[in-house]
Image (cartoon, rainbow, N blue to C red):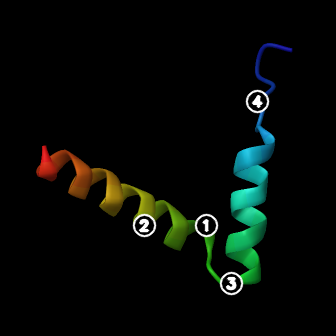
Amino acid sequence: MGNVRFIDQEWIDLMLEAKKLGLTLEEVKQFIEEEKFSLQQAK
């Protein structure tokens, strides 16, 4: 089981919701990175 990755249900739900909204994985990734950067700048 060394290289097996576990994806928890919260991430699966997030990606399913993004798909319903017509978003790509890349768009979700970009949004998360931008929000993370914004939060770091606000500190």
> Which is more toward the observer, 38 or 26?
38
| SS for dot 3 | loop
Q: Is residue 2 above or below residue 18?
A: above
Residue 6: which disc? none
Cα gap from disc 3 to disc 4, whole angstroms: 26 Å
Residue at numbered disc 1: 25
What whole-number distance in Å separates the C-alpha atoms at marks 3 and 1?
Answer: 11 Å
Q: Residues within 10 Å of mark 2 (few under 14, many from 20)?
A: few
Q: Which residue appears farthest toward the top when viewing the image?
A: 2
- Name the quadrant of the N terminus: top right
Mark 4 residue type: Arg
Q: Residue at x 53, y 67 (%)?
A: 28
Q: Which mark is residue 5?
A: 4
Q: Amino acid at mark 3?
A: Leu
Picture coordinates of residue 31 (x, y %)?
42, 67
Whether tag 2 and tag 1 are in contact, CB under 8 A, the answer is no
Q: Secondary structure at mark 4?
A: loop
The residue positioned 68% from the left and 86% from the top of the image is 22
Say whether disc 3 or disc 2 marks the residue closer to the N-terminus.
Answer: 3
Q: Earlier in the sequence, mark 2 or mark 4?
A: 4
Whole-Å distance between the Cαs marked 2 and 1? 10 Å
Q: Dots 3 and 1: beta carbons under 8 Å?
A: no
Q: Which residue is mark 2?
A: 31
Residue at image coords 42%, 65%: 30
